Image: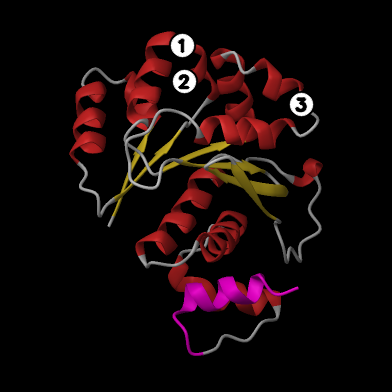
Amino acid sequence: GVQTCAFRSLTDRHSKTTVKAIVEGASDDKIVCMNVSAPFICMVPPLREMLLAGVNHCNYLFCNESEAEELAKNMGWDAALAHADKMQEVAKMMAALPNVRKGGLKAVITQGADATLIACAGNVTTYEVKANPWTLTKADLKDTNGAGDAFVGGFLSQLALGADKQVGHAVAVAVARRGERAAEAPYVAAELGLELGPLPGAQRLARLLLQP
C-alpha cells in the first residue's frame, strides 16, 4: 500500500499530530510519500521543521524545481546551489536527509517539460519527458495549478501496483499532461497514435511512452 501526505495541511491546527501519526505509524511494507507542496513551507521555520520531521519516516519526497531550490536555500546547501548541475546536487542533498525507512529516502524533482530527477543514496537518475505530441508554448499555458498533484497521483498509482520508477514516471507524465485517470489510458494512447497490448492500460501506455 501507499500512504501520502501533502503539506498544505500543516497550516491547519491539528495537522502536526495527524501527519506525525500517519508517517510514524506506517509499517515497513507501506510506501510513505510526502509532497513539499509549496515554497513557503521551506521558508517558514516551524513548517520546515515539521516537513523534515515527516520526511524522516518517508520513502519518497516529491517537489518541483522551485520548491527544491527554496528548500536548498533555507537548508544552507550553498555548494549544491552553486554547482553547474544545481538541481542534481540538490536532489542528492534531499535524498541524504535523515531517514529511518528501509532503503532510505528517494527525492523526486519535477522540472516542467525538462527531465525529472530521482535521487537515492547519492545517485541521480534522469527521466526525460518523452512523447509530447502537443506544440504548446509557455504563452499557451493559462493555469498549471494541479499539474504537480496529477504527476504524483500517476506516479503513486504505479507504485501501488508494484511497477518500477521508470513506468511510474511515464504514467505520471501522461496523467499530468492531460489530467487523465489511469483508466482512461486508451484515450491518451489514441491521441498519441499508439496501440495498447494485453497489459493493464496504464502500464501499457507507460511502456509505449518510454519507447525511443
Q: Which mark is residue 83?
A: 3
Q: In the image, 134: left or right of 39?
A: right
Q: Which amino acid type is shown beneath numbered disc 1?
A: Val
Say if 125 sits above or below 175 in the image: above
Q: Secondary structure at mark 2?
A: helix
Instruction: Report crowding for label 2: few under 14, some 14 to 19, many 20 or more residues within 10 A (C-alpha).
Output: many
Front-most of residues 18 and 128: 128
Outermost residue, top direction?
45
Q: Which residues are magenta?
A: 198-212
**Residue 200 magenta:** yes
What residue appears at the point 52 percent right and 13 percent down from the top-left corner? 43
What residue appears at the point 78 percent right and 53 percent down from the top-left corner? 136
What residue appears at the point 20 percent right and 24 percent down from the top-left corner? 17
Q: Secondary structure at mark 1?
A: loop
Say which label, 2 or 3, has the lower sequence index: 2
| Picture coordinates of residue 25, whole percent (x, y) | 18, 39
Say if 23 sits above or below 169 in the image: above
Q: Which mark is residue 44?
A: 1
The CA span between labels 1 and 2 is 6 Å
Outermost residue, bottom direction?
198
Q: Which amino acid type is shown beneath numbered disc 3?
A: His
Q: Nearer the viewer, mark 3 or mark 1?
A: 3
Say if 194 sits above or below 97 in the image: below
Q: In the image, 39: left or right of 81?
A: left
- Labelled pair 1, 2 in contact (Cβ < 8 Å): yes
Front-most of residues 34 and 52: 52
Q: Nearer the viewer, mark 2 or mark 3?
A: 3
Q: Quick one: quadrant of the N terminus?
A: bottom left
| Picture coordinates of residue 64, whole percent (x, y) | 59, 36
Q: Which mark is residue 41?
A: 2
Q: Which amino acid type is shown beneath numbered disc 2?
A: Ile
Q: In the image, 143: left or right of 28?
A: right
